Amino acid sequence: MPDEGEIRVDGEPVQGPSKSRGMVFQDHALFPWYTVLENIAFGPEVQGVPKAKAREIAKEFLALVGLEAYASRYPGELSGGMKQRVGIARALAGSPDLLLMDEPFGALDILTRDLMQRELRRICDQLHPTILFVTHSISEAVFLADRVVVMKGGVIADTFEIGIAHPRSFDSPGFGETMRRIERILMEDEEEVPVP
């Protein structure tokens, strides 16, 4: 339980896990004993969807992330980027109102991270989910988000409406300036560390 305050979604206090919220972790958190298809079907099945229908839903989301050929594979047989794509498909298969993503690309190499950012953007353009995405990368935040909430010292320091049309790239007009504005907020009042 929190020491103070509360979190509300659509005016209702958050009391615990809910099928209205999906989660994608930094470490994919897939069940190693389930196949890719079984991992994705897990959410709908837990929600009471009949097994055959849950598998149909899983196949749709597997196709969405481009991994149809890996349906019968196990997580241990996949690359890091593939595991995260399965994690995204699994979270979306439960039809959440809100998708929470906790640094989902943080452990990936730079090329895979770039690919995953573009994949997520493609999925957003297709499904229009509401996503709360946590990242330490300013460029990733500006590339993906419509709104960036800057946290500093455990509190909200500022909020930025990005206002750059999608598809956007790192050389889109305003991209660099937006990054610099966010960086200035993060660097304000930082004490200089003396060099020994």
Image (spheres, rainbow, N blue to C red):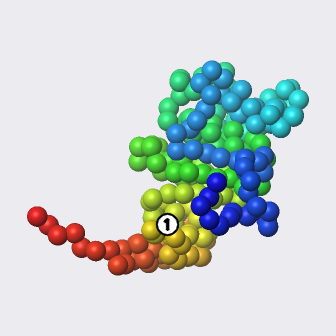
Q: Residue at 49% of width from left, 36% of height from top?
A: 80
Label 1: how many residues lie within 10 Å, few (<14), some (14-19) or many (20+)? few
Residue 90 location (% of width, % of height): 69, 38
Left or right of 186: which side holds 191? Answer: left
Can residue 57 be spotted in the picture?
A: no
In the image, taking residue 72 as reference, residue 137 lies left or right, namely left
Residue for point 64% across, 54% down: 1
Label 1: state its secondary structure: loop
| In this picture, residue 120 sits left or right of residue 171 | right
Q: Is residue 162 above or below residue 92?
A: below
Which quadrant of the structure image shows residue 51? top right
Q: Is residue 98 left or right of residue 110?
A: right
Q: Residue at x 52, y 77 (%)?
A: 158
Quadrant occupied by the C terminus: bottom left
Q: Callout 1, which amino acid?
A: Gly
Q: Is residue 134 above or below residue 191?
A: above
Q: What residue would you read off at disc 1? A: 154
Which residue occupies the extreme left position in the image?
196
**Residue 17 at what x, y percent from top left?**
72, 47
**Relative image position of residue 138 (x, y in whole percent):** 45, 64
